[in-house]
Amino acid sequence: MQVGLARRTLTPFGLWVFGAAASAPMVVLAGGIVATYATTKVTALPLTFLLVAGVVAVLAVGYTAMARQVGHPAAYYGILANGLGRGWGVAAGLVALVAYNAIQTSLYGLFGATMAAHLGGSWWVWAGIALAAVGVLGVRAVALSTRVLVAVLAVSLLIVTVFVLAGVGEPADGGSSWEGFDASGLAVSGIGGAVAFCVAAFMGVDGVGSFVEEAIDRRSVSRATIGGVVVLGGVYAVTAWAMGVAVGPQSVAEVAAGPAGGLPFSVLERLGGVWVVLGELMLVFAMVTSMLAFHAVIARYVFAMAREGVLPAGLARSSSGIRVRAPRGGSLTQTGIAAVVVGAFAFSGADPIAAMFTWLSALGAMGLLCLLLAASVAAFRAPTSVRGQRPGMWEWRLAPVLGVLGGVVVLALMVGNVGSLLGAAPGSLYPFLLPAILAATAVIGGIWAALLRQSRPEVYVGIGRGTPKIHAVPDSMSISI
């Protein structure tokens, strides 16, 4: 008997919420934008956000077209298996697990350090509390997680809006400068680092593809993913512009780098101290809900790959029968992995921000960008059985080609500047560890697929087969009848 996820339980709005919550606008405001200004000194950060959002949105066209057609909870795994071959699918599945786990676990370092700075104590104790909370929510039905994410996301967007109004309402230079959108500001040495930070800000929106089996309407996967990138791209660009206006485009890098600057809360304080308190509180909740969103995606990857025998089959089992409302095995596995990683960083005495958060988030963002590129290639090469008899030229030809061209440029900038992002000394080989880890993971996936082909051909043939047939796993309405 096949085991499936609960069909028709996520609305289009619910899908969008998961993607937006994973990106976490409050974390981008308080962490990403401030750190990008401070590290790169790029004044044209608002324009950079728009350009990167455009590239990611075009890359997402082929990805979501494939995700919609394949219908696999382990989206990249299913997409590459059906578009490029089963070995590529297994490689993509393992890379996705590494990338999503890296980003999700990195947030425990950020959360722990933030809480320790405000309330005292060891960062790993706070990280452990967050880990337990995410673990408990992760084994519950997806509807509960969605309600939590909606509440936090709504208040976070409110605070971002208030920040923009506070910044634009009291411009540092006496007027609203548009220097942040000046293309000449892109021709600076720090642009590669700024691009990398912007890419990281959008990662997580692609996780919507993993909920395709639970979506009320598969077409909404495309709208939620691409719409999420476009909307968040606009929000982040306007927010970065407002920060530059609030303290001055030429001064924003210096203010962001100085502890006394207190960005973004010093700008929120212009409208009253209550907004500062609410902003700090929402930053904490936003980190937790972002962890929860990534946790849900990882749990579905583990469940779907285990269901096909690529991972241990026991991880796809459910105590609730044939219809799984939450992939418990995958959820517990992700919690266990996160606990081990957090424990390892705590035991080694590594800095939770400079080491754990920075390195793991960079690894995850680089891995997911590589997977988006691979998904566009898979869409371009997908057979007629996947694309359909009358495929759209934009989805299956133009967008994948344009996405790959733009994505390669973005990836090159990201890889070329990873050393400065990680604070490595010039000439150090440490930054090359990140692409090496991703490449090694992909090779291991290819080897594992080859071994399955020889030793378990029935498993190999079923790689990437997607959602079980509807009569194999009846919907809850059918069961009640």
Image: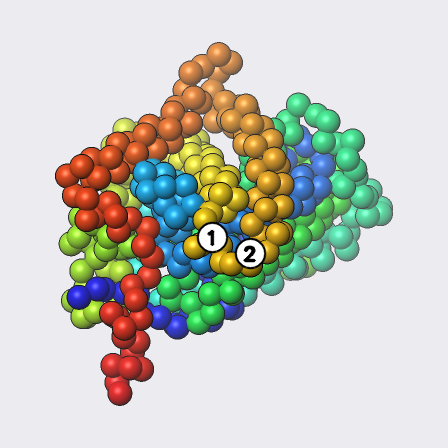
The numbered mark at residue 360 is none
**Relative horizontal placement of residue 19, taking residue 360 as reference (left or right):** right
Residue at image location 75% in from the left, 45% down from the top: 245
The numbered mark at residue 384 is 1
Disc 1 marks a residue whose amino acid type is Thr
Question: Does residue 195 sit above or below 79 in this rendering?
Answer: above
Please, which residue is most extreme toward the bottom here?
481
Dot 1: element: helix
Foreground pick, 314 / 392: 392
Question: Does residue 158 sit above or below 394 in this rendering?
Answer: below
The image position of residue 182, as x and y in percent, is 79, 37
The numbered mark at residue 391 is 2
Residue at image location 42% in from the left, 34% down from the top: 363
Question: Mark 2–mark 1 contact, CB under 8 Å?
Answer: yes
Disc 2 marks a residue whose amino acid type is Pro
Camera sees residue 362? yes
Residue at image location 19% in from the left, 49% down from the top: 458
Residue at image location 42% in from the left, 67% down from the top: 215
Foreground pick, 237 / 95: 95
